[in-house]
Every structure is written in structure tokens, then in C-alpha cells.
Image (cartoon, helix red, strand yellow):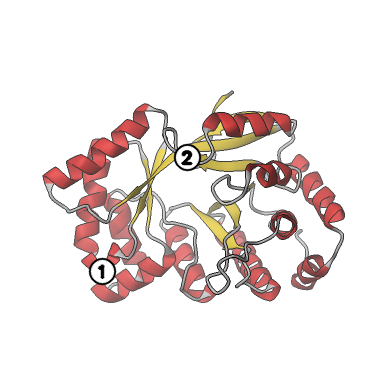
Amino acid sequence: MGISHEQALNCFRSDDLIGLGMEADALRRRLHPEGVVSYALLREVPLADTQADGASLDRLCEEIRASVEMGSTGVRLLSGGLSARGIEWLERVFGGVRQRFPSLWVESLSATEIVALAASCGLGLQETIARLRDAGLSSIVGDREQCSLDEWIEVHAAAHSLGMQTVATMSCGAENSIEQRVDLLAAVRQLQQKTNGFTAFVAQSLPSCKRPNAEPTAVEQLKTLAIARIFLDNIANIQAGATTQSLKVLQMGLRFGANDAGSVTPDESSASEEDLRRIIRDAGFQPVQRDALYRTMFLN
């Protein structure tokens, strides 16, 4: 049984960072006694210049193919507001990628974009997601962005009802109060109890839009990570991503409840696969590559 809402708030107010880390680490060891830390190879590909015609899809798929040949097991298609082009356009894009890569994990569209897309095409959330899934979409993006917490939960609940597993992502930046963070954690835990549809939780460290230079401190990142692990005892995987944290903070996060180091792009990334393997080993764990559903592929 996870901690209560009030206990989580008290944890955020606490100065006992080491104590929180030890408690989170103990829970991680109970859930993952094998002593491994997972990571994935995944490419992010923007769709801004993609048209739903043969030549444009061919160019997109060639970019994806190069990454697949280097070991990527999934692709995140960055739509950037392209939901305004309509559901038929998205169906053609996802369908074109699925036709060329039948087993590739294809992730795209945030809850905010799903809500906007459903409204623009006059469909319910479940029907909208079902059409995209049938076209070739494997999962939606976990970021909350601009939608309300209730909308975000409704979108993920709809995805889970269709058998689509998702990842929950929370920012620990300056714009999120501790009350807002605990509200999101509580909502995620409650939905997980109903659907068991979340494969992982990601504590993302992002700078504030209002204070661009005020990035979350390492202490704030580690505290959020530890509290997420303690609170979300019904979600198997807690991710400390290399793309949003320094490698040193990421390495420390592996002792603050995280059992996953996120994903890197095989051919271009601020953190390489070898970087991840090294810091995982230096933290005392064995690195293991996984797919998007957190299924182990092979040890490294």
C-alpha cells in the first residue's frame, strides 16, 4: 500500500533527502531484486515536413529505417500541433509507417493533442484513439502539457480501455507546486488501480517557462524521483531519463528508486548507449536493453 496524499506532501516538505532515497531504494530492490537497470533505444522523428503522400512517407520511413538498423525498437513521432491537419491525415501517416515496419513501436500525440483532435473531428476520446490505434499507433505520449489533470486522466483511461499501455510523465519544474505534483501522483495511482495500464512513470526535470534559467536542482529532481517510487508502488517501473537529467544526477537516481535509465537515440544523442551502460555499471547494476513495453531484450 502506497503512502497517503498527506504523507506525500510531508515528504516533499522534508529535508531528509537521504532517508527518502533509502526508502525508495528499498522499495526498488523489492520490486526489482535482479540488480539490473533497463534502457531503450528509441528515435524521435519530427513530422513537421511530412505530407501524407508516397514520396514524403518514403523520406520519413528512410529516416526511421536507419535508426531501426542501428537497434531502435521504437519511434516517437513528434507531431507538434499537427493534430490540426485532421484524423485522416494522421491515419495515413501512422498507416504508412506501420505498413513498412509492422513490429515497430510507434508513439505519438500527447493528451492535449488527443483532446484537440477529438474536438475538431467531432469524435469521442475513445473512438479517436481507437481509429489511430487501428491505423498503426502503438501508444500516446505521457506528457501532460496544457490540458487539465482531469482531461489527461480521461485520455489515458480511454487508451487503457482499448488495451493501449502508456507511460505517465510528470515535470518537477518550478511551475509545478508540490500540491500539484502530489495531485498528479494520486490520480496516476488511482487510475493504475483501475486499469493497470501504465508501464512506467517518468519524473521529468524541465526548466520553468516563466523562469527559463531556473532549472530544478539535483536535490529537487532526486526528491521527486524518490517520492514517486514510494507513492506509486503499483507501477513497476520508475524512469530517470538521461534526456532530461545530467548523467551524474541520473546515476544517483538509480539509488533513489529508479530502475530504468530512459532511452537514447542510437546515432545522435547527448548521452550515448555506451554512456548509459557505463553509468549503470558504475552505480552497481547490470545494464539491460528493453523494448517499449519494458520487456527485456538482452543483457549488456
Residue at the spot x=58%, y=71% of the render? 211
For the question of whether residue 73 can be seen, the reply is yes
Is residue 106 shown above or below 224? above
Marking on residue 234: none
Badge 1 marks a residue whose secondary structure is helix
- The residue tagged 2 is 269
Q: Quadrant of the C terminus?
A: top right
> Label 2: how many residues lie within 10 Å, few (<14), some (14-19) or many (20+)?
few
- Sequence-wise first label, 2 or 1: 1
Query: Residue farthest to the front?
Result: 213
Q: Position of residue 235 (x, y in %)?
A: 64, 52
Q: Residue flagged by tag 1: what amino acid is it? A: Ala
> Label 1: how many residues lie within 10 Å, few (<14), some (14-19) or many (20+)?
some
Would residue 97 be found to the left or right of residue 144 on screen?
Answer: left
For the question of whether residue 296 can be seen, the reply is no
Of residues 149 and 205, the one drawn nearer to the viewer in this rendering: 205
CA gap between label 2 and label 1 equals: 30 Å
Q: Quadrant of residue 28?
A: top right
Of circles 2 and 1, the one toward us is 2
Q: Residue flagged by tag 2: what amino acid is it? A: Ser
Badge 2 marks a residue whose secondary structure is loop
Q: Position of residue 216 (x, y in %)?
A: 66, 61
Is residue 215 shown above or below 246? below
Q: Quadrant of residue 220?
A: bottom right
Q: Quadrant of the N terminus?
A: bottom right
Residue at the spot x=31%, y=38% of the render? 64
Q: Position of residue 45 (x, y in %)?
A: 34, 47
- The residue tagged 1 is 84
Would residue 51 be found to the left or right of residue 184 on screen?
Answer: left
Q: Position of residue 90 (x, y in %)?
A: 24, 57
Query: Residue farthest to the left?
Result: 54
